């Protein structure tokens, strides 16, 4: 998932398309803790690019459940 998220962010995919990667990760047996850890690693990679880091932070909101109920994953 990490590689797909990095690629998606670099290609400027929209946030809901990137969220689908998290949903697929869960469907394949990934858990919330693993998803958060992977996203934190991605965040570190993008720490020098505010726009890309912001997108990772928004994905972390989905992973942590800090979003509207209709967007909850876990």
Image (cartoon, rainbow, N blue to C red):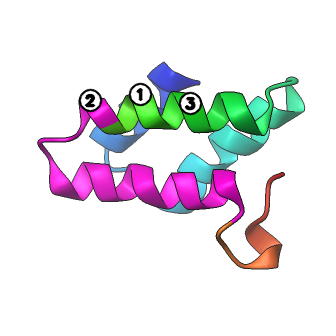
Residue wearing tag 3: 37
Q: Which residues are magenta?
A: 44-65
Query: Residue 5 versus residue 30: which sits nearer the camera?
Result: 30
Q: Are the residues at dot 1 and dot 3 in contact (C-beta closer than 8 Å)?
A: yes
Q: Does the rendering let one see residue 14?
A: no
Tell me where residue 54 sits by quadrant.
bottom left
Q: Residue at x 53, y 28 (%)?
A: 38
Dot placed on the residue nearer the N-terminal end, 2 or 3? 3
In the image, is residue 70 above or below residue 62? below
Q: Residue at x 74, y 68 (%)?
A: 71
Q: Residue at x 88, y 33 (%)?
A: 27
Magenta stretch, main secondary structure class: helix
> Secondary structure beneath disc 3?
helix
Q: Residues within 10 Å of mark 2 (few under 14, many from 20)?
A: few
Q: Are the residues at dot 2 and dot 1 in contact (C-beta closer than 8 Å)?
A: yes
Residue wearing tag 1: 41
| Residue 62, x across and y down, in percent | 64, 59
* Horizontal relation, residue 46 to residue 59: left or right: left
Q: Is residue 50 magenta?
A: yes
Q: CA distance from mark 2 to mark 1?
A: 7 Å
Q: CA distance from mark 2 to mark 3?
A: 13 Å
Q: Residue at x 66, y 51 (%)?
A: 63
- The image's mark for residue 45 is 2
> Secondary structure beneath disc 1?
helix
* Horizontal relation, residue 50 to residue 61: left or right: left
Q: Is residue 73 magenta?
A: no
Q: Residue furthest bottom?
A: 68
In the picture, the quarter occupied by the N terminus is top right
């Amino acid at each position: 998932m990490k590689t797909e998220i990095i690629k998606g962010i670099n290609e400027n995919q929209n946030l809901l398309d990137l969220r689908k990667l998290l949903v697929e990760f869960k469907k394949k047996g990934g858990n919330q803790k693993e998803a958060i850890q992977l996203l934190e690693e991605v965040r570190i990679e993008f720490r020098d690019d505010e726009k890309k880091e912001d997108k990772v932070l928004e994905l972390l909101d989905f992973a942590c459940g800090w979003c509207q109920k209709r967007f909850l994953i876990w």
